[in-house]
Image (spheres, grey):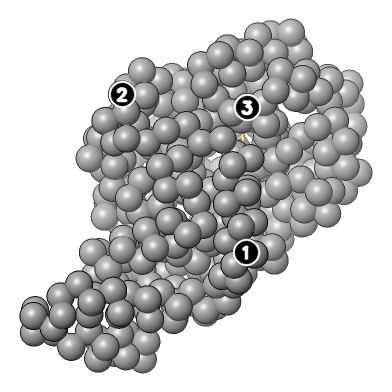
Amino acid sequence: MTLDEIRDIYNLPITTLIFRAQQVHQKYQDPAGVQLCTLKSIKTGRCSEDCAYCPQSAHNQTFVEPEVLLDTPMILKDAQAAKDGGASRFCMGAAWRRVYNTKQFDNIIETVKGVKDIGLEVCCTLGMLDAAQAMRLKEAGCDVYNHNLDTSREYYCKIITTRSYDDRLQTIQNVRDAGMEVCSGGILGMGESIEDRLKLLLELASMSPQPDSVPINALVAVKGTPLEDQKFVDSFEFVRMIATARIIMPKAMVRLSAGRTEMNDEMQALCYLAGANSIFLGDKLLTTANPNATDDRQLLDKLGLHALNPDDARKIHAAADAEGHTHEDPFAEHLEEGASSWAHACEGECGHDHEAEVETAKA
Ligand code: SF4
């Protein structure tokens, strides 16, 4: 896949883009399923990294009150509450540059085992990990590790200077090698260009295998961070990114993550139409606000969507693979399918030559 191909997908008429995204979504995902996850900050603030968007960085003067690592029973209480509230995955985030082999990591290993025993999928996001640490987490029962690329390689240095893009890729490789699923995505609205966003998608989609989860975040501009004056990302640019991610990474869970408090119901519905199929439930996402869980439930009910069982999702992915949908050239495949669908639907009455439009788009 090339950047040009991704750009062509992103720039399709929005009607066609969402149609394409739905074609992929119906084939590779439970079309009405939305995975419900909970994200808990288990160690807050005073992080030595200088991520420009983050209220937890020690470089930024923000509202965040630092907290030491929470103890295991306290976290397990929240995990049980998350499960009782309908979550199928519990994500634990620690504001660390990297994991060190200390008593604190031993405590996290115990916590991972406890969350697993509750019957939840376990995800951790703890900063950089070496290969042995990744293996310990996997052996304790950690299913998934989140480590975002955030943005394009080119724009990255404007956002973070204390660790490199390649450091991030190495942690992702360590996670993959240990047998955990990879959750990796980015943040939109940090001053990056559309090209930067598409390059981020290219980086993610070029991983082999592709990430199992791709969170697409909208920046929540927090006072006291270098990005405090950034305007919220344009809604339609955001939806285009979701749809493009869905098309080029058909088996990934596309996670509608930070920034949902700034999105109305209609905008969130568009994101679901574009292929988003996971949200975080609960009033807080680490340290920033998240919609109320009751409102989320009501919206899902209104839209006729249901909580997704992640094992069912995996079965659907495997069945689609068994049917031979390879997606080596997703653009061409879906253009062809789209062409016949349009032609069939309008039988030429609209006066447009759809086959010619497809050829133009492919060119
Ligand atoms: S590494 Fe994580 S917690 Fe630390 S500053 Fe960056 S985003 Fe924030």
The Cα–Cα distance between marks 3 and 1, rounded to whole angstroms, is 28 Å
| Residue sitting nearer the eye, 135 or 60 | 135
Q: Nearer the viewer, mark 3 or mark 2?
A: 2
Q: Is residue 302 above or below residue 166?
A: above
Q: Which amino acid type is marked by label 1?
A: Asp
| Residue 344 appears in view | yes
Label 1 sits on a secondary structure element that is: helix
The Cα–Cα distance between marks 1 and 2, rounded to whole angstroms, is 34 Å
- The picture places residue 345, in percent across and down from the top left corner, at 20, 72
Q: Which residue is mark 3?
A: 90
Q: Nearer the viewer, mark 3 or mark 1?
A: 1
Q: Which residue is mark 1?
A: 321
- The picture places residue 154, in percent across and down from the top left corner, at 54, 66
Q: Which amino acid type is marked by label 3?
A: Phe
| Residue 111 appears in view | no
Quadrant observed for ligand 1 in the rendered image: top right
Q: Which residue is mark 2?
A: 298
Q: Which amino acid type is marked by label 2?
A: Gln
Label 2 sits on a secondary structure element that is: helix
The Cα–Cα distance between marks 3 and 2, rounded to whole angstroms, is 21 Å
| Residue sitting nearer the eye, 49 or 284 | 284
